[in-house]
Image: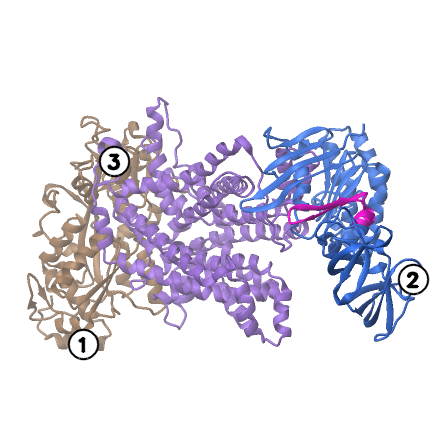
Amino acid sequence: MTRGPLPTSMVVLIGLLAGIPAAIACDSPRQMEGFKTCADVAKAESEGTLVVYSTDPEAAAEQELARFHALFPKIRPNYLRLQAGALYARLLAERQGNVYLPDVTQLADMSFALDFQKRGGYMQYVSPEMAAYKPEYKSSPEGYWTWGALVMAAIAYNPNLVSREEAPKTWKDMLDPKWTDAISVKVTISGLQHVEWYMLRQLYGNDFWSQLAPLKPHAFDSYVQQFDRLVNGQDKVALTAQYSGYLMMKAKGAPVEFVIPPDGVVAAPQPWGIVKEAPHPAAAQLFMDWFLSLPGQTGNAEVLLTHSARSDVPPPPGGVSINEFKVLTPTDWHAFEQTHAQFVREWNKITGLR
Amino acid sequence: MNRPRIEVANLAVRYGDVTAVDDIGFDIASGELVTLLGPSGCGKTTTLRAVAGLETPSGGNIRLNGETVYSASERRNVPAEKRGVSMVFQSYAIWPHMTVFDNVAYGLRVRKLPAAEVRENVQRVLGLVQMQAFADRPASKLSGGQQQRVAVARAIAFSPSVLLFDEPLSNLDAKLRAEMRVELRELQRRLDITSLYVTHDQEEALAISDRVIVMNGGKIEQIGTPEDIYNRPRTRFVADFVGSANLIAGKVRGPGSNGTLLFEAEGGVQLEVVASDASTERDTVALRTSYIHLGSMPGSHNAVPGRIHRRMFHGDFIQYVVDWPAGQLIVRRPPTELFDEGSEVTVSFAPIHCVLL
Amino acid sequence: MPLVVLVCGALVIYPIAFLINESLNVGDPSTFPPEQYGFDNFTNLTDDYRALANTLLVSCIATVLAVIFGFLQAWILTRTNIPGRQRLERLMELPYYMTPLIGALAWGVLLGPKTGLVNQAWRSLGAPGDLFNIYSAYGIAWVMALFEGTVAFVMISAAMKSMDPSLEESSRVLGAGKLRTALRITLPLVAPGVLSATIFVFAEMLGSFAAAFVLGIPGRFYVVTTEIWQATLSFPPDYGRAAAMGLSLFGVMLITLTIARFVLKHGTYTTITGKAFRPREMDVGAMRWPLLALAWGYIVVAVILPLGALLLTSFERFATVILPQMHFTLANYQTALQMGSVGPAFVNSLILGVSVSTIGVVVIGVLAWIIYRSRMPGRGAAEYVIMFPQAVPRLVFGLGLLWAWINMPIPIYGTLWLLGLAYFTVFLPLGLRTIASVVLQVDPSLEECARVCGAGWVYQMRTVTMPLLRPGLVAAWLLIFIASVRELGVSIFLMGPNSKVIAPAIVNSWLSSSSELSAAMALIQTATVFIAVAIMFSLARRVSGVTQ
């Protein structure tokens, strides 16, 4: 939030002259119902539409957007779900063809967000709500992307098949040969999987993964498949089990249990940002303000069953607070990004793709 | 020994509401060629197929060589492949994926004859139809006439006791048809195979058959030798369908001379006619067009003046339309007897050719 | 008139050109046009030999199974006298209404290892292991064969119906029994039709995606299409490799199709003379009941079982097949119907279905006439080109379409127009094949008569040709309509926020929401298609009058 000696307009002018894209912020944000905004609300409403690209499940994302729509009935949200890298690839393909459809985008992988920032794809808009986020949870300089959610993952198992005594308690318990052919993980394209691979490697060395490989884990595109198989007994344990998936199944009454290893739970962030050439910029800014605020984040946590990066947001329904466990997440994202090719090679071998 | 080869009795074939064959019966003696003749839809093909076992009748019974192959009352229906009859189809049904040899050998191979015997038989019958040179040719490359010969060869290869023909010549052109007709008859005579032949071509039927069964609307109109059918038709239909005939309307007035009957047609024309059998209420006389002379005829005959209305040259004969007091007559004369249109002639014909129906 | 051919040809070649272009891209995949060209993508394919081998394995097994299913059903329903044949023939269309995705999901429920419903029943009978594990190459082949079996059935029964029955009768009269007749006469004569069906089905299998996606990946069994899928999902997306893999499949298919054309041309037996044959049924006597059971068996296994499994899942709170765990609810249907995107997706799919079929049928009718009836030079080449999309895996073609159209100055990207254009391009082979068979049966003298009477080409087409082709046109319309509504491979790539369609939505929900929700959506989709087709069918019957 720029509160420097120069008024905003001067900053913008200098920025333009220097050729640096200027940060949009404001001196006196408007107080709306539960959140502050720097956006021009009237203009947003006249734009009338908001297009969001994200990897979140459609049913849940639409519920969250419906809440926004309830607050601003004149703005109609339009949501497109794409999977993992396909989302980012589509974004880039469109831009390269000079087609600009989305206003706001969530990217499931920090590598993508960093890459997009490098390419100048994000609009730099400093929302007043960003103040509530720790520096490591948003872009630097701020305003490009912010973590809209934190996806936690650890181990889950089916209590009908695996007794409490047999169940793994730590990450290292997973290396027991009794889990051969009974483990599910996520596929190579999963950002979450990349984080887990990276963090456990840091904790235990690369031996961890080379010892896991002979257990022949089954890889899946989605946590839905993993949990279905767990419930139906086709797998006994899920190694990259999303906490949100566990909460969802538990709420439906399915037999699942979640293990919080003492060494920590892996967390993959979901960076959200406004696309620079957004066709509805004011609506996008208004949305970001609301989304990153307490009501927006609380709503998001409720529908997606994920945690928020804001500390004042309650945990998802049925879940434990983020303070109850140790969060394993990379600190140096650039270093993380550079391990991607290696991860792909190794993970393909572990999951039998190549 | 003299037991008929084919015996059909009370045969009926019905499809839903439609009766294709309505209670017919006939016998065919050994070595005979009998033709089922009639217009399309008269039931002749259905009857043939019923004898072959390709149609299931609704009633009656059929015996082949003394054995019952179909009987409604006994609920017996021997399948086609076990009846031992052979058939030549209208479309020839030559299998395009085999050679001529394989086509002809099929029936022999089914009967598991040794290869040498098969070869001998195939070559024999191919010789009979003059197709030896084509033995190894793929069957799909044959012309219509050649296919027809192969179909016949195939049918006789295993020396069946009964041979069925389903309009085998109707897909050929007129000249070929005339030639093939003769060849078929020759073959049948030579091999002495009992044959049941179906056609709608009355000229063909008359030329090759020992006896003709005229059918119409699922029923039999008349059974007889070709001469019988031609000279002594029993019904209007037969008179009209077989050969060309004039149908003269009128009334019987009483006996005439020499055992004839006096028949008065329209316009006061008085004719002496014969009846085919004991007469009841008859009001039509059938008179064949080729039995009418133009000009006077010696001997006791009917003679009536008339005038040529139209003349049409048909090559082998001339057809005249002659006006006479009872209307119009169609007369066929050899091409040497040329009359101009409009000229006066005397129409004369013998009483024996006036058949009272 | 040649304009139509050129436009359609261009529609097909343009995306393929992009594919070829991209397959040679060995530089940064996200730059366009590619910066570096090379053959590395192709030479690297040898690393992926396992996926290629898997693809061939599954395709071969599936093709053999599908042709067997199709042949048996065709023979039973066309040549024997089992009761209720007409009804069964209509029921044979049903599997076509469901996407293979739905089928794969359903079979996972039925034959999943340890807990599949059938496996559970099997175990309760005392058997030690599973009856069958559907998550395997054979499982994938089985599901694919069940669905493609209907296609094989339609093609083979058409060949059987157009066979001169006296060819079989003469065999029987000569003393051959029914079995011998069937083997020696019927089989060789329908062989060209069966071969044609086999090639077509094989092409479909090579490019099929849904079954391998659902049933292959969990078992670590990858085929080319699922590998291409993975390649496009990763970042940076390995488009070059994806394009190279897709083109290699295309190459295999082109070769197979060419061989097939060659064989068929030289070995065809002209049994289809255009004469109307009434195929005479064989009386199979006591075998009627086992054969009837077999015919119904196919319907039960291909349609009723999977639909039943889906129905069960859609009503569960969480998808399970373990009886004591089951809880039931209507919530899935509520969610599905209330989802903001579902309504527009259905509407879009239906709009696309109707418009693509309607326009497609007219254009393809003209194309078919040009290719098979006119003397325009180059029409053989035109036929070849228009059949291309059949040999390219749908997924790969979708990629080509994406690049091709995103770079066009015409702003149709992201709109329904693009999807419509894409569907049209992709369904050209299907429509052409259907209408061609009818065109070939029309006696040319009927059209020549019109010309002699003074009708110009357009007038003749409108008043004589099109009405004569009507049964084929109606059939093509229905086929394209159904194919459009259940289309997945192309839609996944070209869908935009304003142009969502239903099949990708089901996949999305299966991947990200829950199996129960996707089961509910799948059933809603199947029901919608069913109702729509029933309406269209009755409309078509009214329009076509008594020509049926």
As drawn, the chain in purple is: C
Q: Is residue C485 above or below residue B325?
A: above
Q: Quadrant of residue C481?
A: bottom left
Q: Are marks 2 and 3 on the same chain?
A: no
Q: Tell me where residue C336 appears, x and y as whole percent.
A: 24, 51
As drawn, the chain in blue is: B
Q: Residue furthest front?
A: B254
Residue assigned mark 2: B297
Q: Nearer the viewer, residue C377 or C338?
A: C338
* Disc on res. B318: none
Q: Tell me where residue C158 appears, x and y as whole percent.
A: 55, 49
Chain containing mark 2: B
Label 3 neighbour load within 10 Å: few <14, some 14-19, many 20+: many
Q: Colour of chain A?
A: brown
Asked whether the viewer can see residue A54, the reply is yes
Secondary structure under tag 1 reads: helix
Highlighted range, magenta: B206-229
- Upstream in the sequence, badge 1 or badge 3? 1
Label 2 neighbour load within 10 Å: few <14, some 14-19, many 20+: some
Residue assigned mark 1: A14
Amino acid on which disc 2 is placed: Met
Label 1 neighbour load within 10 Å: few <14, some 14-19, many 20+: some
